[in-house]
């Protein structure tokens, strides 16, 4: 069983739409959680950390449900520049980060 | 602001050749890791280190060696390249502080023919 499971998509949405990505993780001892963004042929870059209380950064909202071992990312008012692959990342222990396969998002004009 | 630097960016090897992928970080991070990324597989952990002189295996360590003689450097060695090692390789570094993110190098695209 994979440590982190994500729907690979692709998600094709019009500009201005709201889109949600979900992710589940298998290890209940996981310590920290992140969403990364990866543009084509580039390295992953941190989009935001995810906390149990939920956190928001502009148009982006991340939620963590430890009981259900579930992480989500909501993007409101999608922009063309949001087109990328979004990676759900879980830190299980020390620097052992486990990645979902990524969800591909294309925002259409 | 160098961050994590990987070299080379691209490499083509013949089956059986050996090579070393270089990774250096200037953030004084304790933890460093190597990942490979393949289509449909996501990033998978190859080897990691929690400090100079300490390394351990990740999910997919076979065919790769690492060493960590300094805090800054964490090279990845392919001893005898195989076509199955064709992939994009990313090096990452992380602070030992709790809940801190990983910073990635720009990646090395390796093709083994």
Image (cartoon, coloured by chain):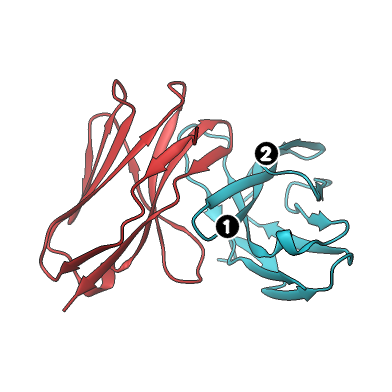
Chain colours: A red, B cyan
The secondary structure type at the circle numbered 1 is: strand
Q: Where on the picture, by quarter, is residue A12?
A: bottom left
Q: Is residue A79 above or below residue B77?
A: below
Residue A108 % position (x, y): 19, 75
- Left-right relation of B64 to A3: right
Where residue A74 appears, as percent x and y from the top left, is 20, 49
Tell me if mark 1 has few (under 14), some (14-19) or many (20+) residues whose alpha carbon lies within 10 angstroms of its own.
some
- Counting from the top left corner in percent of width and height, residue A88 is at 39, 46
Task: Give the Cα separation between the discs numbered 1 and 2.
Answer: 14 Å
Q: Residue at x 42, y 68 (%)?
A: A39
Label 2 marks a residue whose chain is B
Q: Do callouts 1 and 2 point to residues on the same chain?
A: yes
Q: Which mark is residue A54?
A: none
The furthest residue to the bottom = A109
User: Going from the N terminus, do you reach mark 1 or mark 2 first?
Assistant: 1
Image-quadrant location for residue B37: bottom right
Residue closer to the observer: B49 or B56? B56
Protein chain holding label 1: B
Q: Nearer the viewer, residue B84 or A26?
A: B84
Q: Are marks 1 and 2 in contact (CB under 8 Å)?
A: no
Question: From the viewer's perspective, is residue A47 above or below residue A52?
Answer: below
- Residue at 31 percent across and 24 percent down: it is A66
The quarter of the picture where the N terminus of chain B appears is: bottom right
Disc 1 target residue: B37
Which secondary structure, mark 2?
A: loop
Left or right of residue A90: residue A21: left
Q: Where is residue B52 shown, x and y percent of the image?
A: 78, 40
User: Could you tell me which quadrant the C terminus of chain B lies in?
Assistant: bottom right
- Give the residue displayed 89% in from the left and 67% down from the top: B17
Q: Which residue is mark 2?
A: B58
């Amino acid at each position: 069983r994979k440590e982190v499971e994500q729907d690979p998509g692709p998600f094709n949405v019009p500009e201005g739409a709201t889109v949600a990505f979900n992710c589940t993780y298998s290890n209940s001892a996981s310590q920290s959680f992140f969403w990364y963004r990866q543009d084509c042929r580039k390295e992953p870059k941190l989009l935001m950390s995810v906390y149990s209380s939920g956190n928001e950064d502009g148009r982006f909202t991340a939620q963590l449900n430890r009981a259900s071992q579930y992480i989500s990312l909501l993007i409101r008012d999608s922009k063309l520049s949001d087109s990328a692959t979004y990676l759900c990342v879980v830190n299980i222990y020390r620097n052992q980060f486990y990645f979902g396969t990524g969800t591909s998002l294309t925002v259409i004009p | 602001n160098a961050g994590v630097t990987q070299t080379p960016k691209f490499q083509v090897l013949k089956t059986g050749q050996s090579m070393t992928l270089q990774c250096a970080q200037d953030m004084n991070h304790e933890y460093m890791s190597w990942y490979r990324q393949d289509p449909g597989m996501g990033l998978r952990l190859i080897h990691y280190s929690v400090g100079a002189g300490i390394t351990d295996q990740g999910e997919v360590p076979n065919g790769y060696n690492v060493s960590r003689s300094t805090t800054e450097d964490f090279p990845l060695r392919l001893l005898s390249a195989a076509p199955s090692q064709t992939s994009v390789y990313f090096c990452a570094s992380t602070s030992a502080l709790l809940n801190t993110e990983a910073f990635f190098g720009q990646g090395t695209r390796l093709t083994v023919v």
